[in-house]
C-alpha cells in the first residue's frame, strides 16, 4: 500500500508493508506547498494541487506513481464575478474527487473562492458549475463567506457510490449542499446544524463544516466535523444530530475518519477552540465512538503525553483497510496497524506542516 503525504514543502511517498514502518520512496515538488492529494482509483492516476510562489496554483497528475508528472489545464473562472462585482480568480485548489465508475472520465475540483469545477475528459478541461456558482444563497450577503480565508472554499466533495449523479459538497462558510442530478441543481442540507458565531445559529446557509464524509456501504449516513462540533445524519442530510466528546474535551476540530463497515463508528482528533488552535489540554488524542457519538473512548496509546501543540487538518487523517494514518501541523506523522489494541507509532517527526494524507 502507498501513502501519499502532501506537505507545505512537497509531496512525500511511502510504502506500507504488513506490520512494518512506512518506508520513504521519494519526494516530489520539493519546496512547494502541496495542498491537495488525490488518487483516482479508476485509472490509478495521482493528482496533486500545488501552490507555486510565482506562478500561483497548478494542477499535476501522474499515471506511473510519480515517475513522471504532467501539468493539467487549470480550472478558470473566466467571466465569473464575485458578489462585489470583481472578477473571480482561482486562489486555491482545496479538493479533488472522481466521478462514479459509470462516469470514468468525470472529475470534480473544489476551489476557493467557492467554485465547483467539472471535467468530463479526465482533466483535459474544466467547466465551472454554473448552477452552484449562481445559487440564490450565494447572492445574499453573509451566507457565503471566508472561514480562516478571504473567500468561501469547497473542501469536501462526496459522490454516492450507488448513484453517480448524487453529490454532496461542503463549503466553508456556507454549509452542505446536495445535488441529485449530477450538479444541475443544488439544495442546502443544513437542518440541525448550528452556526453559533452568527446572530441566528439556525440559518439555512452560513455554516462552517470542516470535513464531510459519506459511508461507502450506507450512503444515507453522513458525518461531519464542524466548526461548532461533531454532527451525523442517518437520512442523507435531511436532519443533522450533534454529538459531543467526553467532558472537558473540545468537540471542535477539523479531521474525521469513519469505519468501512460500521456506520456508527468514527474517530476524531479534537482541537482546542478556533482562537487557540492547539491540542486540547496540550495533549494529542484520538477519540473513537462505536454508537454514533453516544460514548467516546480515547484511542491514544503511543501518542505524546507531554506538552504538545500539534493539531491535524481536515485532509490529514485517513483510514483504509483498518490502517490509520495522520499528519500534524508540526510535521509529525503517526500510523496504527493494530485494530484491536490500538497503538500509534511515529515514523517521521521532522517534516513541515502536513496538508493532505492519502492511502491507496
Image (tube, rainbow, N blue to C red):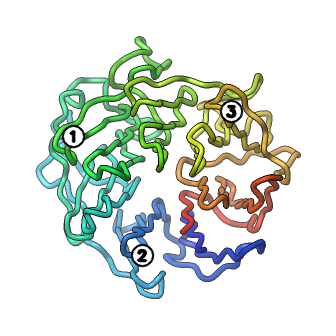
Which residue appears at 69% of the width and 55% of the height? 330
Compared across the picture, whether 145 is left or right of 255 comes to left
Q: How far apart are marks 3 and 2 (CA)?
A: 38 Å
Which of the labelled discs sits on residue 44, or is there none? 2
Between marks 1 and 3 in the image, the one whose residue lies nearer the viewer: 1
- Residue annotated with mark 1: 132
How crowded pointer 2 is (Cα within 10 Å; few <14, some 14-19, many 20+) is rated as few
Residue 162: image location, x then y, percent: 34, 51
Which residue appears at 39% of the width and 33% of the height? 236
Disc on the earlier residue, 2 or 1: 2
Which residue appears at 36% of the width and 17% of the height? 203
Residue 250: image location, x then y, percent: 68, 28
Between marks 3 and 2 in the image, the one whose residue lies nearer the viewer: 2
Count of numbered circles on the image? 3
- Residue annotated with mark 3: 272
Of the pair 228 and 120, the residue shown nearer to us: 120
Q: In which quarter of the image is residue 176?
A: top left
The secondary element bearing badge 2 is classed as: loop
Q: Distance between the residues labelled 2 and 1?
A: 29 Å
Compared across the picture, whether 92 is left or right of 120 comes to right
> Please, is residue 71 above or below residue 255 in the view?
below
> Please, is residue 27 above or below residue 245 in the view?
below
Q: In which quarter of the image is residue 266?
A: top right
Disc on the earlier residue, 3 or 2: 2
The single residue placed furthest to the bottom in the displayed view is 67
How crowded pointer 3 is (Cα within 10 Å; few <14, some 14-19, many 20+) is rated as some
Quadrant of the frame with the C terminus: bottom right
Disc on the earlier residue, 1 or 3: 1
Amino acid at each position: 500500500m502507498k501513502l501519499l503525504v502532501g506537505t507545505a514543502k512537497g509531496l512525500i511517498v511511502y510504502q506500507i508493508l504488513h506490520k512494518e514502518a512506512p518506508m520513504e520512496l521519494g519526494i516530489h515538488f520539493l519546496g512547494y506547498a502541496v495542498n491537495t492529494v488525490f488518487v483516482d482509483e479508476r485509472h490509478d492516476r495521482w493528482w496533486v494541487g500545488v501552490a507555486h510562489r510565482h506562478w500561483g496554483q497548478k494542477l499535476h497528475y501522474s499515471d506511473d506513481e510519480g515517475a513522471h508528472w504532467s501539468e493539467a489545464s487549470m480550472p478558470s473562472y473566466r467571466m465569473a464575478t464575485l458578489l462585489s462585482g470583481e472578477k473571480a480568480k482561482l486562489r486555491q485548489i482545496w479538493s479533488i474527487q472522481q466521478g462514479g465508475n459509470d462516469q470514468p472520465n468525470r472529475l470534480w475540483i473544489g476551489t476557493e473562492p467557492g467554485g465547483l469545477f467539472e471535467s468530463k475528459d479526465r482533466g483535459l478541461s474544466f467547466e465551472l458549475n454554473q448552477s452552484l456558482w449562481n445559487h440564490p444563497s450565494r447572492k445574499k450577503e453573509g451566507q457565503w463567506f471566508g472561514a480562516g480565508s478571504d473567500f468561501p472554499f469547497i473542501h469536501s466533495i462526496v459522490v454516492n457510490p450507488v448513484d453517480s449523479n448524487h453529490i454532496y459538497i461542503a463549503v466553508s462558510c456556507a454549509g452542505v449542499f446536495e445535488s441529485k442530478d449530477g450538479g444541475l441543481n443544488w439544495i442546502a442540507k443544513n437542518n440541525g446544524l448550528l452556526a453559533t458565531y452568527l446572530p441566528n445559529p439556525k440559518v439555512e446557509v452560513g455554516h462552517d463544516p470542516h470535513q464531510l464524509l459519506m459511508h461507502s456501504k450506507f450512503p444515507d449516513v453522513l458525518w461531519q466535523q464542524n466548526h461548532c462540533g461533531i454532527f451525523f445524519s442517518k437520512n442523507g442530510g435531511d436532519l443533522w444530530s450533534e454529538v459531543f466528546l467526553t467532558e472537558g474535551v473540545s468537540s471542535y476540530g477539523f479531521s474525521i475518519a469513519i469505519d468501512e463497515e460500521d456506520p456508527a463508528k468514527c474517530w476524531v482528533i479534537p482541537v482546542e477552540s478556533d482562537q487557540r488552535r492547539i491540542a486540547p489540554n496540550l495533549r494529542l488524542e484520538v477519540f473513537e465512538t462505536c454508537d454514533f457519538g453516544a460514548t467516546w473512548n480515547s484511542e491514544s496509546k503511543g501518542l505524546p503525553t507531554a506538552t504538545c501543540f500539534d493539531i491535524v487538518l481536515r485532509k490529514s487523517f485517513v483510514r483504509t483497510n483498518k490502517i490509520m494514518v495522520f499528519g500534524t501541523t508540526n510535521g509529525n506523522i503517526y500510523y496504527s496497524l493494530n485494530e484491536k489494541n490500538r497503538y500509534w507509532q511515529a515514523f517521521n517527526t521532522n517534516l513541515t506542516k502536513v496538508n493532505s494524507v492519502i492511502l491507496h
